[in-house]
Amino acid sequence: MATAGRAFLILAFAVALYGIGASLYGWRRGERAWVDSGRRAVYAIAGVLTLAFAILEAAFLRSDFSFNVVATHSSTTTPAFYKATAAWSSQEGSLLLWVWLLSLWSSLVLALTRRRLREIAPVATAVLLGFAAFFLALTVFFANPFETLAPTMVPSEGAGLNPLLRHPSMMFHPPMLYSGYTLFSIPFAFAIGALVTRRLSAEWIQGTRRFALAAWLCLGIGIVLGARWSYTELGWGGFWAWDPVENASLMPWLTGTAFIHSIMIQEKRGMLKVWNASLVLATGTLAILGTFLVRSGILDSIHAFGASTLGVPFLTLIGAMVLGSVGLVVARRADLRSEHALDSLLSREAIFLLQNVVLVGLCFVIFWGTFFPLISEAATGTRASVGPPWFDRYTVPLALALVALAGIGPLVPWRRVTVANLRRSFAFPVGAALGALVALSLVSGVTSEPKALTLLCGVAFVLACVGQEVWRGTRARRAVSREPAPVALVTLVRRNRRRYGGYLVHVGVAVLLLGVAASTSFQHAKDVSLKPGQSARVDGFTIRYVRATADAGAERIALGAVLDVSKGGRHVTTLRTTRGFYPSQDESLGIVGRFFGGESESQVGLRAGFGRDIWTVINPNLGPLTPIIDQGNRTFRRAMLSIAASGKPNPRALDELFALRDAAVTAVARRFVTTPWPASFRFIVSPLATWIWIGALIAFLGGLIALWPAPATARRRVTAGYAARVARELAGSSSSPAA
Amino acid sequence: VELLIVLAVVLVVAALVTGPLRARARGEAGEAGGRDAGRSVELADLEAAKEAKYREIRDAELDYRTGKLSEEDWRALDGGLRAEAVALLRRADRLRDRGEPVG
């Protein structure tokens, strides 16, 4: 079915080009039939790419090695779960995933807005189809996922999936990131449409707000899954390394966060139109930049499996997006004038604006640090890079400011606030922060980390702010409805999903930062070499290397350890960690050696708890095995040569030889257990690390609440009251005060 | 078989994409154009502004009830917002009644 797959890609590319032309022609001539035809082109591409992706997935699941991409990224021994995910571990498959997701989201937004945004939608359709055409051109001309091997070249076994990608997070991490990137293309496209057509009212924002929020949510989930993968798979004990590809996903998330806040100001007050247009255009461009960084290999990254040579087409697209965006905003500056001025520096608008500046500043710092190797190379000819300490120096103060603003924002009303109201709103949260300061100062060692201490107090402030808001809202609701408190709370949230969903996101982010601050500032780490029976002490815990383990399976050889963790003589937990070695296709490593010389990955031993995580990873030293492996290589090479010298190889003899080889490999691996030697371990005790993941879950729940549409009947009921009041006003005199 | 599948998909795509053009050629009712289209765009803008205004009125009331606004401030703010909402409704009514775009 490779031919059909390729034909579908070409068909989709042709339909995308047609759709661009039809949409723009229909828009220019005011002919709805052509506009509708352009919109249907998007639906058609979604359908065709669904078929193409299904063909590729089927090839992976069937281990059809006539597909080059399957032969190089999967194997018969790869578990089915990872075969399904291997499609997007390849350059070709991930580009297809990108454009497929884009076509699905584009179809959704165009179906939802088919009776609205009449002027903007055709231009937005053309922009979305332009993205689709670009990625389809890449898959058709540069990275064809349906490229096949000549029948004589089809291997009996594939190279297998990169071991680092054999992690449950990898099933969802790339699709979530790509969903975030492609969803951000939607507000980007509609912003372009609004600018081109000069329809710059709040309508396009209302039409695409949920897509911006969904993009923020998906990208956030993708980032957190990547952090979790780093924590449990990469074997260094951290969750964020300021790696270029990590940074590339964080940058559009930050500007997207700023956009989600600042569009509220445009929606309500008609302000910040230039800022919002610039933010969403920057976010869309950063989303493409993120895809480019993971796919280009232009910067050194742990994501080196994504390296390729697609730099020139991507840079051309990014250049066009930047120049086009700047040109459009400049050309439309007269139409983007604010309808109102800022009433007061003590208003929610002003706090949002300040928060936006901090978020964009944070994005700029990360951008500078990420691209510093390229900047330094261009300026000095020498490629220099900056590490985590550099990022921490600038991002921590900005993160502290963000935490403070996350608490202040919900307490300040729109337009203006009086000093008396400020005092009433801030008394409890400030008291909570001071209380936290006093309590934490009493905990040994906390005052030695002033930044972490400040952040923890900031977290207490945010939790108190949001808690007070929810409590006051529930109380107000109860005063009107006389409902029991839980019912009043649920009703309050249901009727104000955006507000209280947003507050919950603030809580989640604060809790996440609590985990980050505590686990990084107060963690205890130790690298030791232990033999079975020996122990090490870390942060009061005694960790004993009980015994070595070895498991020689068809897919990999796992050498590991069982460790007993105790404190004060009491057993706390048992940890198991392994290092898995995957067979290499490199024949120079020898018949036995290739089973130990290929790619490897770590399975960490982790005991997660609300108070602290106890984390360990083993790095088994293969040095003592080398003489045995070399001897095995020589023996089997002689046996192979003797079989080859006999003229026509006897298949039965070869089968027996391979069985002997497998037994020898297993025996070599067993040596790690029967005559164990010292292995290297990294032990880490991280306080409150689990709260990183709990905080992320809370934030995503808040995002879902804010995103979830209220049932139409409930929405009508909520607005009906206000509409009735305004209608009464309309019937009477518009100058009479509110009742 | 593969070729037939591809051919079938091409035909389905062509039928889907050209559907609106064929419908127009058959003379089926199309979209309102010209002045009507302009008015519907204006109305959509006003509808969006009205929804935003209602939301602002609701948020101001919630701010008052949760103690972030004094009663005096809220009454002044609420009155102003409702006046703005009334102006939007009047513009929309004029647009519907006169059947022409308003500036």
Image (cartoon, coloured by chain):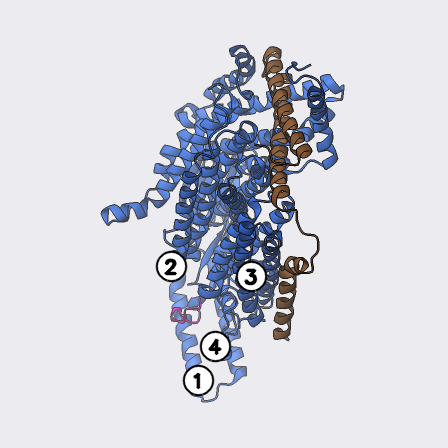
Chain colours: A blue, B brown
| Pointers 3 and 2 within a single chain | yes
Q: CA distance from mark 1 to mark 2?
A: 32 Å
For the C terminus of chain A, give its image quadrant. top right
Q: Nearer the viewer, mark 3 or mark 2?
A: 3
Left-right relation of A239 to A384? right
Mark found first going from the N terminus, 1 or 2: 2
Q: Nearer the viewer, mark 1 or mark 2?
A: 1
The label shown at residue A623 is 2
- The chain holding disc 2 is A
Other residues around mark 3 within 10 Å, as few (<14) / some (14–19) / many (≥20):
many
Q: Is residue A590 magenta?
A: yes
Q: Nearer the viewer, mark 1 or mark 3?
A: 3
Who is closer to the viewer here, A469 or A240? A469
> What type is the residue that disc 3 sits on?
Val
- Segment colored magenta: A584-592
Residue A170 seen in render? no
Please tell me whether mark 4 sits on a helix, a strand or a loop: helix
Instruction: Name the spot of residue A337 as percent of width and height, x first.
Output: 46, 31
The label shown at residue A15 is 3
Other residues around mark 4 within 10 Å, as few (<14) / some (14–19) / many (≥20):
few
Whether the residues at callouts 4 and 1 have beta carbons within 8 Å, the answer is no
The label shown at residue A355 is none
The label shown at residue A153 is 4
> What type is the residue that disc 1 sits on?
Ala
Q: CA distance from mark 2 to mark 4?
A: 36 Å
Whether the residues at callouts 3 and 2 have beta carbons within 8 Å, the answer is no
